[in-house]
Image (tube, rainbow, N blue to C red):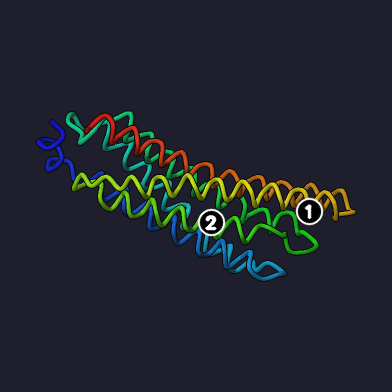
């Protein structure tokens, strides 16, 4: 059944590919933003339209689902996949925007390391999504996403321990903690995307 339906609905795969490219570019810009202090607002202004493009793609997918009778795999899984991808873009923007809103007094230890891990997760997801149309099941890539999520958790815990041990200004502590929380959540969302892909593979095996 899966084989017969794939050729009829190629547009979804194009949307997935376009979305993950924008997310990869957002992650690259987010890394650039956090790599140098004081944080450069011009980099943030580059990130904002990227997130808007991701929103536009999600809306296109929802619109396509509403008018398509036959989909390449369960429409619930298509929606879950595009929604969780959009969640990553939302969270990357949220972390970046807070550098401008909070005006933190110093760079945030651990932030760059977590973003670097997120970049690697996104690259793995990009490979898996690239093979989705041709039914390639890059299970190793999905496992790598999980392993990287564990690494991000370890960096996050170490950064939080260090933050509470060294930061003497309670307001700055709250600001930095929130940004670290958001970045760690972005890594979790990458794992959520991997979980949806695993479910798709299992259902269509």
How crowded is the residue under tag 2: few (<14 C-alpha within 10 Å), some, or many (20+)? many
Check the picture and name the quadrant holding the N terminus: top left
Q: Is residue 186 above or below residue 25?
A: above
**Which quadrant holds residue 82?**
top left
Placement of the C terminus among the 4 image quadrants? top left
Is residue 89 rendered to the left or right of residue 100?
left
- Ranked by sequence position, the earlier of labels 1 and 2 is 2
State the image coordinates of residue 112 (x, y, percent, origin top left): 62, 61
Task: Left or right? Give the position of 77 relative to 170.
Answer: left
Q: Residue at x 27, y 33 (%)?
A: 65
Q: Secondary structure at mark 1?
A: helix
Residue 48 percent across, percent down from the top left: 53, 57
Q: Which mark is residue 11?
A: none
Q: CA distance from mark 1 to mark 2?
A: 19 Å
Q: State the residue at coordinates (57%, 57%).
A: 115
Q: Report the disc number at residue 117.
A: 2
Residue marked by disc 1: 162
Q: Nearer the viewer, residue 198 or 133?
A: 198
Residue 13 location, x and y as percent? Answer: 25, 47
The residue under the point 56% across, 52% down is: 93
């Amino acid at each position: 059944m899966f084989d017969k339906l794939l050729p009829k609905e190629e547009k979804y795969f194009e949307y997935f590919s376009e979305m993950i490219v924008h997310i990869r570019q957002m992650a690259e810009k987010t890394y650039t933003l956090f790599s140098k202090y004081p944080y450069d607002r011009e980099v943030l202004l580059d990130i904002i339209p990227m997130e808007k493009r991701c929103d536009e793609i999600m809306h296109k997918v929802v619109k396509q689902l509403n008018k398509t009778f036959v989909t390449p795999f369960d429409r619930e899984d298509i929606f879950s996949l595009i929604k969780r991808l959009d969640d990553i873009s939302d969270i990357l923007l949220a972390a970046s925007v807070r550098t401008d809103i909070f005006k933190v007094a110093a760079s945030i230890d651990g932030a760059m390391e977590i973003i670097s891990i997120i970049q690697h997760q996104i690259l793995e997801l990009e490979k898996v999504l690239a093979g989705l149309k041709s039914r390639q099941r890059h299970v190793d890539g999905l496992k790598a996403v999980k392993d990287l999520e564990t690494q991000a958790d370890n960096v996050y815990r170490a950064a939080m321990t260090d933050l509470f041990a060294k930061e003497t200004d309670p307001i700055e502590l709250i600001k930095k903690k929130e940004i670290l929380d958001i970045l760690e959540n972005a890594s979790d969302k990458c794992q959520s995307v991997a979980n949806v892909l695993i479910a798709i593979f299992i259902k269509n095996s």
